[in-house]
Amino acid sequence: MKVFIVGSGGREHAIAWAVAKSGRAEKIYCAPGNAGIAEYAECVDIGAMEFEKLVTFAKENQVDLTIIGMDDPLVGGVVDAFEAEGLRVFGPRKNAAIIEGSKTFSKDLMKKYHIPTAAYENFDSKEEALAYLETVKFPVVLKADGLALGKGVLICNTMEEAVAGVKTIMEDKKFGDAGNRMVIEEFMTGREVSVLAFCDGKTIKCMTSAQDHKRAGDGDTGLNTGGMGTFSPSPFYTKEVEAFCEKYIYQPTIDAMAAEGRPFTGILFTGLMLTADGPKVLEYNARFGDPEAQVVLPRMKNDILEVMEACIDGRLSEVDLQFEDNAAVCVVLASEGYPVSYEKGFVISGLENFKEKEGYYCFHAGTRQTEKGIVTNGGRVLGVTAKGADLKEARRNAYAATEWVSFENKYKRNDIGKAIDEA
């Protein structure tokens, strides 16, 4: 079969790797792709938001299945555009992807269907938000309503920080139109866990757990980023926690979306906070996490294409989703200065060290092929992933592997998975 992947980051590289591993794809295309994805796919110069061009390409090349990796096109309705032309596509439709596209929608959904989450209020104006802040306990969390590359969340410890945060989101529009509306919610404490799941509109099958590290600096300091590393599984996501989430969060979410006339087919990402009062939902995403995909997919035993087709055909209940009894850690190699400002175009050396090394992967997040070779082309450049018998071994392996590659201005956190030592 012919498979078309839409996206250009480490998540899409991991998907392309999994599709190639399947052995069922005689041809893989990716738009726009990157230098790492080009190892498995023919990269096509079409942007992820150029729906008409994407659909035309899929039709002209007789693509059998298109996989949407990114959030922007999903929220924008790319799946609807493909389905309108009778094309098979994996991902939620626009009316379901709103679960990620609007934080006010997802919070209201959870309230209506009694899905545990933090107390909150939604705001359309700066004045209303500032008035509400006079009534709350600190710290609080401010969230831009729309998509903001994982960065539209501000934790404010004081009234002064919160007032500045409201200005940043709603007046200065640091996150663009994502800040036209905002959510103010209570600050929850506990362990964070990410759980990805395949969905077919009525059935949900969860993958192994993971934990992301959002802050730029060691010790969870600095600005929020798209993710500086992750590990899987989370030792804090016990069987008891899993059972609670299946009963009160995952299935109720899928049932709620169906009841709202928004059946969800694709990948549902649930960000959890394991609070003293039990697990609560931090956020939903409508696609694979990045870099969560880079630790979850290498541990999945199933053929990814078979599972995705089962989702599209509404027969996910027939799938026995299985994962290896091991662990994986991903350390992101970024450009110094990310997520604020950074230089691009530095040659990357040592990528060949990952060739045919069992249990080691180098997923490209921001790279480009040039006459000089493969160069840096983003804030997050590479996701170095390694497996191990347990989390501590996987962490040692991943950090050792980060030394196999080098480029000017290379930066990484040194404490990815440090929480493992406290488990």
Image (tube, helix red, strand yellow):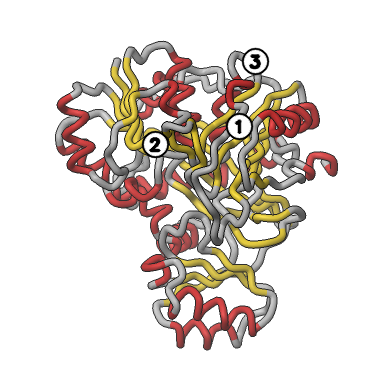
The circle on residue 295 is: 1
| Location of residue 178 with respect to 270 vertically, above or below | below
In the shown orientation, is residue 212 left or right of residue 101? right
Residue 383 picture location, percent across and down:
59, 36
From this viewpoint, which residue is outermost toward the right? Answer: 422
Choose the circle earlier in sequence order: 2 or 1. Answer: 2
Q: Secondary structure at mark 1?
A: helix
Q: Residue at x 48, y 38 (%)?
A: 367
Task: Name the amino acid, label 3.
Answer: Glu
Pointer 3 or 2: first along the chain = 2
Q: Residue flagged by tag 2: what amino acid is it?
A: Gly
Q: Is residue 323 above or below residue 201?
A: above
- Which residue was labeled with disc 2? 266
Can you tell which mark lies on residue 129?
Answer: none
- Mark 2 vs mark 1: give the one in front: 1
Q: Residues within 10 Å of mark 1 (few under 14, many from 20)?
A: many
Q: Residues within 10 Å of mark 2 (few under 14, many from 20)?
A: many
Q: Quadrant of residue 132?
A: bottom right
Q: Are marks 3 and 2 in contact (CB under 8 Å)?
A: no
Amino acid found under the numbered disc labelled 1? Val
Residue at horizontal 69 percent and vertical 53 percent from the top:
278
Q: Which secondary structure lies at badge 3?
A: loop
Q: Is residue 108 left or right of residue 28?
A: right
Nearer to us in this view, 355 or 197: 355
**Left or right: 212 in relation to 167:** right
Disc 2 is placed on an element classified as strand
> At 50% from the left edge and 29% from the top edge, which residue is drawn?
14
Which badge, 1 or 3, is on the more N-terminal residue?
1
Whole-number angstrom distance, CA of label 2 to CA of label 1: 19 Å
Which residue is drawn at the image coordinates 75% and 30% (left, top)? 400
Q: Which residue is mark 3?
A: 358
Quadrant location of the C terminus?
top right
